């Protein structure tokens, strides 16, 4: 049956629907919750799509009766009235259904002046929202559009743009965009001059309203019309939008210089949406954008500039001006600090005094700098092709460092502006965080030795300062790590390690956690440097990290596990003597500690971290020889199989997947085991080294157990691995699942297949001999792989969580059960 056919109303639903409609229209009933009503609306949408004609209403006259019943109530429940309006809009979206409702004079009572508009219920925002949504659903054809225009609906929507409910105002706003787009459609012949354009009646009303609002003295009306234009130009790129723009261009342009209109932030969005539309790509528009960059306040011009720099299609000269706008405050910072700023800007786009005014004001300095730094962070992450010129990274770096010096009080310049800025920014952690983000992004910048020394001095000051908040410290670590990747300095590292040792002993757990994350980052990025490894391993860092494995805070223990795992990794890879059991850097000691955490830690984060480290080791092939690796995997699998956390099990399954691939690479793929001669099969199974190893390590027990796990991702991963193993072991065969018909009645595989089909939960999955399945027997496991329908299991596991979706019949029954019936309520009284 086609999807369309499946959505047709069943006979059972047709019998239940009249009772549901009657119950919903009965004021004595307690209405169902909003979720049920939403599902009911979704069902009607499906029905209308399946049968987009009046047949739905004619076959189910209870629907129109429901509309009449609700409208006749003196004070209907707002939620039911809202539902009624939305449902009417859905069914009226089909043109012949619309005509049918109009013939019954229901539409005027629902959406016209005779409806909720003039009733007390209109005061409820949900009713107004239902009216707007109902109209939006209904107006999909010309008759509905004509009805709304002639019945005064357009004027209602104009008013609702300023509704105190933001949801209603937003819905009204998008409804006007829809009406205008539908009204114009593709029939309009675009003239050369806006004055010669003959707009359709509905479009003319909306455009006239926009023009009148833009020329009014009401700031709220101006903003509403600008937002409407913004949404229109963002969602529609038809040629007629340019004709509309030509009629209002001069009025909008006048707003750029009028201080009385506080709508620059709306103008920013408007200009950016227009810039993304090819309709407006011409010199006159870009001249308007340039004018906006020059006349907007620094706050709005920087937002406009950041948006322009993200455009692919934009004149080079406009992008250069936009970049200049973003760099102008950074130049002002250098100027305030009496530093050389000649390399940052060639010229200013707007009045520098406006930027200085913002930076010297206590109420605006921090927020303005955070905004500029946020834009610069985004700019530094852009593809180089989007940038009009190479960024002056050295000067930009100098200005960022200057801001950080202002913030920690190390720079108090003599200039009045600099003195004022330093007073405002001292200990301002908001600006510190933003500046450190940009500093981290600038780590690829080529700098002089003098600049590098200054940079590391500033970073070290932040790492050492007791006034540095945990969040700022975390970002300081991040910036330091980024810069050390390209400019490793042992002398600086020594100072950093001294600070790091203190931070690892901090009474604040967030600081200890950040310090461990920083240590891990250093190890991963600098592990190839001999001097770094020697310095690290001879320091107190390994011992302090080991101590933090017993930290009272689980997040810290998890970070300590990660750091210890990476320390053990560089020991194993770069220090041969560490591979000797009993040595100071023995991996066995680390494995034992981490295994204990995996077995006993009461919190999930450390256990998950252990699994991540074990998986990383397996990926990097640093688990030892084959026999050691086998023992290691067997130990991890046995522990993880008992864990109650699904992420731990999922991590172990990833480790198992890597182990299987590793074993096939080391020992080679087996020959085909499916052969007519059963003795040959048995012989080849016993010669299959990967299979023997998988059985010894309890892999199959863990995999089949995971298939029945209550957490679906675990079952999905296990099924994927088993299917891979099956394809590897039977790679030269075209075998389908054979079923268990030819097996003895008491064979354990019968039980296993039955259990998997039933989807038994893992706690009900016995792994002892009681099941009759020997998961360590290679022959049994080969039989299980051949007979169990893994493809069917895979399909079941990959169904959505709501695949046992409630049918419409169940929904209708639930609604009836919720609202009850009058007779039942009366019976309860006796």
Image (cartoon, helix red, strand yellow):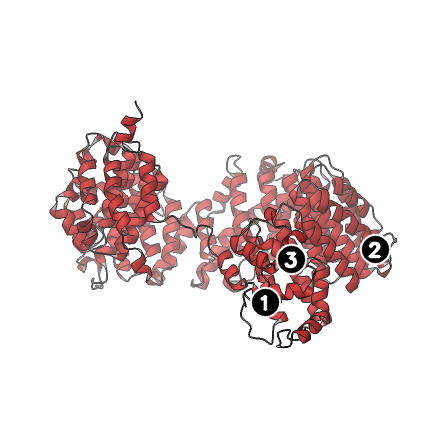
**Residue 593 or residue 362, whichever sits in front:** 593
Q: Which residue is mark 1?
A: 786
Q: Which residue: 84% across, 54% down? A: 586
Q: Secondary structure at mark 2?
A: helix
Q: Which residue is mark 3?
A: 773
Is 65 left or right of 538, judged from the image as shown?
left
Q: Which mark sits nearer the N-terminus, 1 or 2?
A: 2
- Quarter of the image that includes the N terminus: bottom left
Picture coordinates of residue 597, whole percent (x, y) = 73, 45
Q: Which mark sits nearer the N-terminus, 2 or 3?
A: 2
Label 3 – label 1 distance at C-alpha: 15 Å
**Residue 287 or residue 615, whichever sits in front:** 615
CB atoms at circles 2 and 3 under 8 Å apart? no
- Quarter of the image that includes the C terminus: top left
Q: Which mark sits nearer the N-terminus, 3 or 1?
A: 3
Q: Which residue is mark 2?
A: 534
Residue 345 occupies quadrant? bottom right
Q: Which residue: 39% across, 59% down? A: 276
Residue 619 occupies quadrant? bottom right
Q: Which residue: 44% across, 50% down? A: 802
**Residue 809 or residue 648, whichever sits in front:** 809
């Amino acid at each position: 049956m086609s999807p369309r056919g499946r959505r047709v109303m069943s006979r059972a639903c047709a019998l239940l629907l009249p009772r549901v409609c009657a119950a919903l229209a009965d004021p004595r009933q307690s209405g169902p919750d909003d979720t049920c009503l939403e599902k009911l609306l979704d069902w009607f949408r499906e029905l209308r799509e399946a049968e987009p004609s009046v047949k739905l209403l004619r076959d189910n006259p209870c629907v129109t009766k429901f509309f009449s019943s609700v409208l006749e109530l003196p004070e209907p429940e707002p939620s039911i009235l809202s539902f009624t309006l939305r449902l009417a809009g859905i069914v009226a979206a089909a043109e012949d259904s619309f005509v049918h409702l109009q013939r019954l004079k229901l539409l005027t009572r629902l959406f016209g002046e005779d409806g909720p508009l003039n009733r007390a219920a209109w005061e409820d925002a949900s009713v107004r929202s239902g009216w707007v949504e109902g109209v939006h659903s209904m107006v999909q054809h010309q008759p509905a559009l004509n009805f709304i225009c002639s019945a005064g609906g357009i004027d209602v929507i104009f008013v609702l743009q300023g509704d105190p409910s933001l949801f209603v105002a937003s819905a009204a706003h998008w409804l006007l965009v829809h009406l205008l787009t539908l009204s114009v459609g593709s029939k309009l012949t675009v003239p050369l001059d806006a004055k010669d354009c003959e707009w359709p009646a509905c479009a003319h009303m909306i455009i006239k309203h926009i023009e009148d609002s833009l020329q009014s003295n009401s700031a709220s009306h101006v903003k509403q019309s600008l937002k409407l234009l913004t949404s229109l130009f963002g969602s529609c790129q038809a040629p007629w939008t340019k004709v509309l723009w030509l009629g209002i261009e001069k009025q909008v342009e006048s707003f750029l210089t009028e201080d009385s209109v506080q709508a620059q932030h709306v103008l920013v969005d408007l200009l950016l949406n227009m810039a993304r539309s090819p309709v407006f790509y011409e010199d006159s528009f870009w001249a308007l954008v340039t004018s906006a960059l020059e006349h907007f306040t620094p706050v709005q011009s920087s937002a406009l500039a950041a948006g322009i720099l993200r455009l692919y299609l934009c004149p080079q000269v406009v992008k250069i001006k936009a970049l200049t706008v973003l760099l102008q405050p950074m130049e002002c910072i250098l100027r305030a600090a009496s530093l050389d700023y000649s390399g940052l800007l060639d010229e200013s786009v707007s009045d520098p005094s406006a930027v200085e005014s913002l930076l010297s004001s206590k109420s605006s300095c921090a927020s303005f700098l955070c905004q500029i730094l946020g834009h610069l962070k985004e700019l530094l992450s852009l593809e180089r092709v989007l940038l009009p010129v190479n960024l002056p990274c050295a000067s930009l770096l100098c200005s960022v460092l200057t801001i950080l010096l202002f913030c920690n009080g190390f720079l108090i310049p003599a200039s009045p502006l600099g003195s004022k800025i330093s007073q405002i920014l001292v200990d301002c952690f908001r600006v510190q965080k933003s500046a450190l983000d940009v500093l981290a992004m600038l780590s690829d910048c080529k700098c002089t030795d003098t600049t590098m020394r200054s940079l590391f001095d500033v970073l070290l000051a932040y790492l050492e300062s007791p006034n540095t908040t945990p969040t700022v410290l975390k970002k300081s670590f991040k910036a330091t790590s980024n810069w050390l990747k390209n400019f490793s300095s042992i002398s600086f590292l020594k100072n950093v390690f001294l600070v790091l040792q203190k931070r690892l002993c901090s009474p604040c757990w967030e600081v200890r956690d950040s310090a461990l994350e920083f240590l891990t980052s250093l190890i991963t990025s600098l592990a190839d440097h001999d001097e770094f490894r020697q310095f690290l391993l001879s320091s107190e860092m390994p011992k302090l990290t080991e101590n933090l494995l017993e930290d009272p805070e689980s997040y810290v223990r998890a970070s300590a596990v990660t750091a210890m795992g990476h320390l053990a990794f560089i020991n194993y890879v770069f220090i041969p003597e560490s591979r000797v059991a009993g040595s100071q850097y023995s991996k066995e000691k680390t494995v034992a500690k981490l295994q204990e955490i995996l077995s006993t830690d009461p919190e999930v984060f450390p256990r998950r971290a252990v699994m991540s480290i074990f998986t990383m080791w397996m990926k990097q092939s640093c688990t030892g020889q084959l026999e050691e690796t086998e023992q290691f995997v067997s130990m991890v699998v046995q522990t993880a199989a008992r864990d109650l956390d699904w992420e731990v099990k999922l991590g172990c399954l990833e480790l198992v997947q890597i182990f299987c691939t590793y074993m096939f690479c080391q020992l080679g793929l087996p020959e085909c085991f499916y052969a007519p001669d059963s003795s040959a099969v048995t012989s080849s199974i016993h010669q299959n080294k990967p299979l023997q190893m998988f059985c010894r390590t309890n892999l199959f027990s863990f995999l089949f157990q995971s298939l029945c796990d209550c957490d679906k991702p675990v079952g999905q991963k296990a099924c994927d691995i088993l299917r891979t193993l099956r394809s590897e072991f039977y790679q030269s065969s075209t075998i389908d699942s054979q079923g268990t018909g030819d097996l003895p009645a008491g064979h354990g595989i019968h039980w296993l297949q039955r259990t998997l089909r039933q989807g038994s939960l893992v706690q009900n999955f016995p792994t002892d001999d009681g099941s009759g399945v020997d998961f360590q027997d290679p022959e049994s496991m080969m039989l299980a792989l051949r007979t169990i329908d893994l493809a069917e299991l895979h399909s079941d596991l990959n169904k959505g969580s709501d695949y046992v979706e409630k049918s419409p019949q169940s929904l209708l029954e639930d609604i009836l059960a919720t609202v009850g019936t009058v007779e039942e309520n009366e019976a309860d009284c006796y």
